[in-house]
Amino acid sequence: MRSVIEFLLIFTLLMGIASLLHGPDWRTVGIQRITANSSQAWDIAKQYHPRGMDIRDYCDRVVEMNGRINAGEQVFVPVCEVGR
């Protein structure tokens, strides 16, 4: 019985730590159309991602919205804010 209680305490502690490290949840609240200066989604994400958002998550969203990107074309970038 004691080992079960210890396991549950450790599990609860680890889940609490994981939730603190996860950071805020971001949601897309709008879309902005831009002219791509680069064919790299990473370059676009560096320029347009909101402060505090993981640039990798933003880059994934740009790719999901546009697929393949060519420099000089019009692409869509998400406008994101912390979810409530």
Image: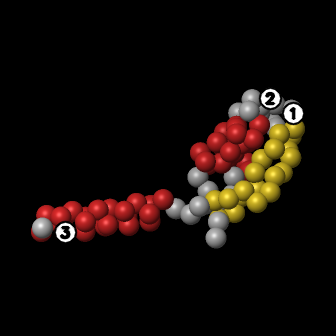
Which of the two marks, 3 or 2, is nearer to us in this view? Answer: 3
Q: Position of residue 23 (x, y in %)?
A: 52, 62
Task: Give the residue type at disc 3.
Answer: Ile
Left or right of residue 27: residue 2: left
Residue at image coords 65%, 65%: 82
Q: Which residue is mark 1?
A: 73
Q: Position of residue 36 (x, y in %)?
A: 82, 38
Secondary element at image label 3: helix
Q: Are marks 2 and 1 in contact (CB under 8 Å)?
A: yes
Residue at image coords 85%, 44%: 34
Q: Which mark is residue 5?
A: 3
Question: Which quarter shows the C terminus?
Answer: bottom right
Q: Are marks 3 and 2 in contact (CB under 8 Å)?
A: no
Sort mark 3 into few (<14), some (14-19) or many (20+) by Cα contacts within 10 Å. Answer: few
Q: Earlier in the sequence, mark 3 or mark 2?
A: 3
Q: Position of residue 72 (x, y in %)?
A: 86, 32
Left or right of residue 83: residue 33: right
Q: Which residue is mark 2?
A: 70
User: Which quarter of the figure has residue 62?
Assistant: top right
Q: CA distance from mark 2 to mark 1?
A: 6 Å
Task: Give the residue type at disc 1.
Answer: Glu
Which of the two marks, 3 or 1, is nearer to us in this view? Answer: 3
Q: CA distance from mark 3 to mark 2?
A: 57 Å
User: Which quarter of the figure has residue 71?
Assistant: top right
| In the image, residue 27 above or below residue 42 | below
Q: CA distance from mark 3 to mark 1?
A: 59 Å
| In the image, residue 26 above or below residue 71 | below
Task: Give the residue type at disc 2.
Answer: Asn
Left or right of residue 18: residue 83: right
Secondary element at image label 1: loop
